[in-house]
Image (cartoon, rainbow, N blue to C red):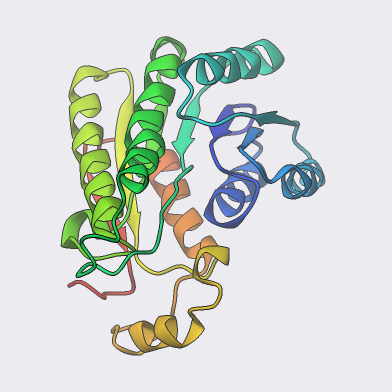
Amino acid sequence: MKGKTALITGSATGIGKAIACRLAQEGVHIAVNYSKSEKEALETKKEIEALGVNCIVIQGTVSDDRKVRDMVQQTIDTFGRLDILVNNAGVTDFVKHDDLEGLKEEYWDRVMDVNVKGMFFCCRAAAAELKKQRGCIVNITSVAGITGLGSSIAYAASKAAAISVTKSLARVMAPEVRVNSVAPGVVQTRWVEGQEDHVMRLAEGTPLGRVAAPEDVAEVVYSVIAHSHFVTGETIKVDGGMFI
């Protein structure tokens, strides 16, 4: 792993940041991508560099194909290679599933643009370099894409689509590139701020009896990248047994 390069979208905070730091611990140079959280991205950069690797910060939304291609090229120009792509950027709008009229068209458009199209744009832009380096892709999806539950019907649909795209890309990018999905359940990040009571009720119903930390997800992502060399096209749940 040492000396390789990873581009991680949406990695200024939360799960993306935890993945970036976990890979940096193994000597991987990191490209941190963010959309709006510049302050947090720069703080993450400092933390990563303190681990003894190089890091760059790139602003851009993954739903913009031109910016995605520029982001990938900037990573390659800086580090001379790209070995690992982690598609972590994601959005949602919290809408109760029985509130059909509340699920506005713009919510559908935004969640599909980022969670599905954006993920695909990143994979496409990085494909040639990843094949050259015999690298890998990990897409951060969600158990919502398996269960149909989650923050909204649109969000669950977007994550189901992302899991499907993962399978398709695993076929077309093989044998040089492995493409897998890691699907967290509830994770203690700023996404769930203000919903602590609801989150704790969910956690109490799981076999492991707690909510995941971002580091729990990061450890599984690291394992898929570093050790699961004969695994591709799979979706690995990280939900404490919530949906056994």
Of residues 110 and 187, which is closer to you in this image? 110
Of residues 53 and 104, which is closer to you in this image? 104
Q: Residue at x 39, y 69 (%)?
A: 186
The image position of residue 29, as x and y in percent, is 66, 31
Q: Residue at x 57, y 65 (%)?
A: 190
Q: How many marks?
A: 0
User: Does residue 131 appear in this view?
Assistant: yes
Q: Residue at x 18, y 37 (%)?
A: 164
Taking 161 as reference, is 47 above or below it?
A: below
State the residue lying farthest toward the front. 101
The image position of residue 87, as x and y in percent, is 44, 37
User: Does residue 228 appear in this view?
Assistant: no
Quadrant of the image for the C terminus? bottom left
Of residues 73 and 3, which is closer to you in this image? 73
Quadrant of the image for the N terminus? top right
Image-based side of 18 in relation to 126, left or right:
right
The image position of residue 215, as x and y in percent, is 54, 62
Taking 234 as reference, is 55 above or below it?
A: above
Q: Residue at x 22, y 49 (%)?
A: 157
The image position of residue 138, as x and y in percent, is 39, 39
Taking 39 as reference, is 53 above or below it?
A: above
Image-based side of 32 in relation to 64, left or right:
right
